Image: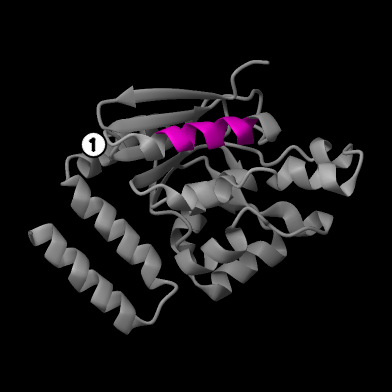
């Protein structure tokens, strides 16, 4: 079976490249490869930034529905989709993660990006969560992450309509952070990753942990944790 992912290390930046032609479908093999790579990233003290890219014309066209359409049982169908908790592992990555997207970033592609800390897209990028159209929900985290990233109203609109949202509109809605011409996507992503990688790593990790945790706890607890981490960094 061909490799679904390629991993490139450029100093403190680890680049994970999806390569499942022609449209980078997310299947069990991709899931398992991603889990293994992320485990290695978490264990690597030298990695300061993770970048997700894709070969071909699209970042990802979503999950391979054939894997649960042909599953012999409900248990096999569940394993095809959730057998390994890639989403939980993504949340455990302590360093900054950047999604660099072009073409279609649909379903899994968009949900992965929403787990990241920064999203740069080419001007040809389309994001969408199409699961409602086939009687499903986006179960790769989008029901939890999109509202946190862009607000409840924007999240519900995207999920319930399953609209295909062009890059500029996605920027306006707060789904992505930056839109650049397709020809400039790689260079802009590299520059952003280099900037973050040059920052003191303990400070970056602390800032990421605090910002994400703030979404799930009272502000008094968040301020106390912020004070503790700030004191440890000064020490």
Along the line of sight, the residue nearer the viewer: 210 or 160: 210
Residue 216 location, quadrant: bottom left
Residue at 82% x, 36% y: name it.
66
Above or below: residue 48 compared with residue 147: above
Number of numbered discs: 1
Which quarter shows the C terminus? bottom left
Residue at 38% x, 82% y: name it.
218
| Magenta highlight range | 30-40
Above or below: residue 95 compared with residue 133: above
Which quarter shows the N terminus? top right
- Where does the image place residue 51, in percent across and percent down from the top left? 39, 37
Above or below: residue 203 compared with residue 79: below
- Where does the image place residue 145, in percent across and percent down from the top left? 52, 62
**Mostly what secondary structure, the magenta segment?**
helix
- Which residue corresponds to mark 1? 194
Residue 227 location, quadrant: bottom left
> Please, which residue is most extreme toward the left here?
235
Q: Is residue 176 left or right of residue 10?
A: right
- Where does the image place residue 95, in percent across and percent down from the top left? 33, 46
- Where does the image place residue 105, in percent across and percent down from the top left? 58, 43
Q: Is residue 188 visible?
A: yes
Above or below: residue 174 compared with residue 116: below
Q: Is residue 181 visible?
A: no
Residue 70 lies within the magenta run: no
């Amino acid at each position: 079976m061909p490799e679904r992912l390629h991993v490139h290390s450029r100093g403190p930046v680890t680049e994970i490249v999806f390569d499942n032609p022609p449209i980078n479908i997310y299947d069990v093999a991709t899931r398992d490869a991603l889990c293994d790579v992320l485990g290695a990233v978490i264990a690597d003290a030298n990695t300061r930034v993770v970048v997700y890219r894709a070969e071909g014309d699209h970042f990802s066209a979503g999950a391979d529905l054939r894997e649960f359409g042909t599953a012999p049982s409900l248990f096999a169908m569940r394993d095809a989709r959730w057998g390994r908790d890639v989403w939980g592992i993504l949340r455990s990555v302590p360093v900054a993660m950047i999604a660099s997207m072009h073409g279609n970033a649909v379903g899994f592609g968009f949900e992965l990006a929403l787990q990241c800390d920064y999203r740069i897209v080419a001007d040809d990028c389309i994001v969408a969560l199409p699961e409602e159209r086939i009687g499903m929900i986006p179960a790769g985290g989008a029901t939890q992450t999109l509202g946190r990233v862009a607000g409840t109203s924007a999240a519900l609109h995207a999920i319930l309509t399953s609209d295909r949202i062009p890059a500029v509109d996605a920027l306006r809605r707060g789904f992505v952070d930056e839109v650049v011409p397709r020809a400039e996507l790689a260079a802009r992503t590299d520059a952003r990753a280099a900037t973050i990688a040059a920052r003191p790593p303990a400070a970056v990790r602390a800032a990421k942990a605090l910002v994400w945790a703030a979404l799930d706890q009272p502000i008094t607890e968040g301020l106390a944790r912020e004070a503790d981490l700030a004191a440890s960094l000064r020490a």
